[in-house]
Image: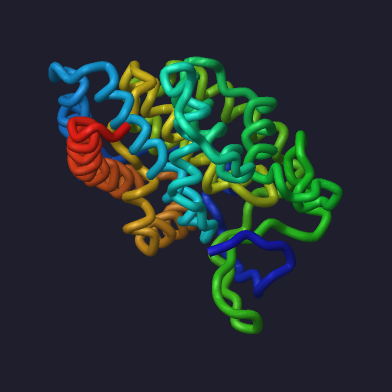
Amino acid sequence: MKSGENSGEIMARTYFFELPEWPRFYLELGSHCPTAFGNEAAARASTLEDEEHGFASQWTATLNVLTEETIKSSAIEAVVLDPECVRSQSRKNSGSRWRGLRSTRIATSSCIVEMMLDATQRSETPLTKERLFDWRAHLFSQVPTTTDKFRVGAWRDDSQGAMQVISGPNGRLKVHYVAPAANRLDAEMERYLVWFESNEQHDPLLKTAIAHLWFVTIHPFEDGNGRIARAIAEMCLARSDGSAQRFYTLSSQILKERKSYYEILEKTQSGSLDITEWLGWFLECLDRAFEHSNQITSSALARESSGWI
């Protein structure tokens, strides 16, 4: 899956952002109540923090989760990072608690780690367009910014044509999605950021699912939208947890379920503003991520007890 301009044949299709009610999402509680998945899983995910593990144990687990989250979020977009470089930069950049540990300076890994750290360790800091511009600049810090595709400090301008999400080989490209026109982005993102910082959606896990869907639907940048959307989701989850420590990784689970992830996105964006099915998929995926976190944290604690950190 990739983003591109003037690629593939655009099929006649109505997207939900074209509906007059956009973006008034709703869900059918009578047929399915996805909050049950998320709330039960969230309680399990907080178990490690409630247990009497030492401070170092919890931050060792956080380091492992941050490393995996950074690697897997990039892998969803077919960007391959070296695990040891990411781990080293996570140690280096996560603050004084890791000071003195050996690290290898790998610029690309470092910049992506810095984005994830900013999202999770400073989750209570308001999300602004300037902060999003900074995140995107981190993602493409090693790419020349003289071309339109990698401009920094601005939304996309569609100078090369409509922003499309496409897949397939050249000559047989399939268009999965066509994003809102660039002249809508200022208004769309202003509305999104006001909502994000409001208390309009009281359930934090539902807000996480909606924030992710809404951002990738707007698709405000030429590239990197998926990774930034997942960073925003992690920011929501950190706010929900009320802690900078991370014991589960959403991107790892999305990578495992990447095919169904793209399928449910395409189906939801081409339908009505009823996002019940998306919420159910997202929160069930999050539930499985919580389950997987038990393996990560257990491994982290076992390594610490054997002298590794």
Q: Is residue 24 visible?
A: no
55 on left or right of 79: left
At 51% across and 19% down in the image, what residue appears? 197
Q: Nearer the viewer, residue 189 or 291?
A: 291
236 or 17: nearer the eye?
A: 236
- The residue positioned 38% from the left and 24% from the top of the image is 238
Q: Is residue 307 above or below residue 96?
A: below
Q: Residue at x 39, y 33 (%)?
A: 208
Q: Is residue 150 above or below residue 14?
A: above
In this view, the residue farthest toward the bottom is 171
Q: Is residue 26 in sight in this rendering?
A: yes
Q: Residue at x 15, y 30 (%)?
A: 44
Q: Total number of numbered labels?
A: 0
Color theme of the render: rainbow
For residue 23, above or below residue 223: above
Q: Residue furthest right?
A: 146
Q: Position of residue 243 (x, y in %)?
A: 34, 18
Direction from residue 33 to residue 91 in the image, left or right: right
Q: Is residue 45 left or right of residue 229?
A: left
Q: Nearer the viewer, residue 227 or 268?
A: 227
Give coordinates of residue 176: x percent, y percent: 54, 65
Residue 70: x %, y % from top left: 46, 43
| Residue 45: quadrant of the picture | top left
Residue 233, image x, y percentages: 43, 35
| Of 125 and 106, the residue lying toward us | 106
Q: Quadrant of the C terminus?
A: top left
